[in-house]
Image (tube, rainbow, N blue to C red):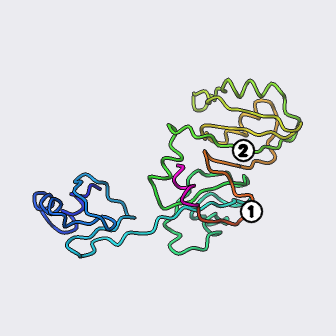
Amino acid sequence: MRLDRYLANRARLSRQDVRRLLAEDRVLVNGETSRIVDLEVRVFDRIELDGEMLQAGKAARYLMLHKPAGCASATQDATHRTVLDLIDEPDKQDLHIAGRLDFNTTGLMLLTNDGQWSRRLTQPTSLLGKVYLIETEDEIDPACVDVFAQGMYFRFENLTTLPAELVLLEPRRARLTLHEGRYHQVKRMFGRFNNKVTALHRESMGPLTLDLALEPGRYRSLTEQEIAQI
């Protein structure tokens, strides 16, 4: 919400009165005076008017989790353990997932209460690369490399996937970089070659890489540098 609208609603003032208060430097946003009428007010901002606290501001939270297999990418699930069940933090119910993983897929998962930050990370236009380590039931056909790079047509969605980079590591092991997240995309792409994905592990999302010190099911807060990268 814009600052002028927030003040008008919260303090029951007219827009004209709000503009006067801003011009007189009587409004503080996060401890500093602000005259920007269209400044976007977020739940994390501390807003003061003439020394009175109108909004204390919540603490922004950014967590990196090593998701284990057999865990639902959800905040609630009546049947299965969820990633939120692994978090021991106050107000964890305010967190949401930035980039889900399938039930048995492991690896990097990010949780936050900052919707703007997570949208920058996951919106389709960002085209941030997501890197996966893959193991398959049969040996990987080298033809996959070129087919994945060209893009693959998905009839159900009536679209062609964006070019993906596949690097063969071993006969049944590869690293894949995607720039989108279609439904069961990795499994469907290998399914075109009649090869079943037996293990899928996300190593990174954009500039953020899973901390190798994190055991499955463990998490930590992101550093300020990591947060600023998105």
Mark nearest the camera among 1 and 2 is: 1
Q: Point out the image quarter for the N terminus.
A: bottom left
Q: Does the segment drawn in magenta span residue 226? A: yes
Above-or-below relation of 116 to 123? below
SS of the residue at dot 2? Answer: strand
Q: CA distance from mark 1 to mark 2?
A: 18 Å
Q: Looking at the rendering, which quadrant does residue 212 occupy?
A: bottom right
Q: Nearer the viewer, residue 8 or 19?
A: 19
Q: Nearer the viewer, residue 61 or 72?
A: 61
SS of the residue at dot 1? Answer: loop
Please tell me whether the stretch drawn in magenta is mainly helix, strand or loop: helix
How far across and how far down the image is residue 59, in percent? 45, 68
Kind of residue sitting beneath label 2: Tyr
Looking at the rendering, the stretch of residues picked out in magenta corresponds to 223-230
Who's the residue at 71% across and 32% down the image?
A: 165
Location of mark 2 (residue): 132
How far across and how far down the image is residue 11, in percent? 19, 69
Left or right of residue 34: residue 169: right
How far across and how far down the image is residue 223, in percent? 58, 61
Q: Which mark is residue 124?
A: none
Kind of residue sitting beneath label 1: Ala
Q: Looking at the rendering, which quadrant does residue 192 occupy?
A: top right
Who's the residue at 69% across and 26% down the image?
A: 149
Label count reads 2
Location of mark 1 (residue): 213
Who's the residue at 14% across and 57% down the image?
A: 19
How far across and how far down the image is residue 52, in percent? 24, 76
Q: Does the segment drawn in magenta span residue 210? A: no
Above-or-below relation of 45 to 174? below
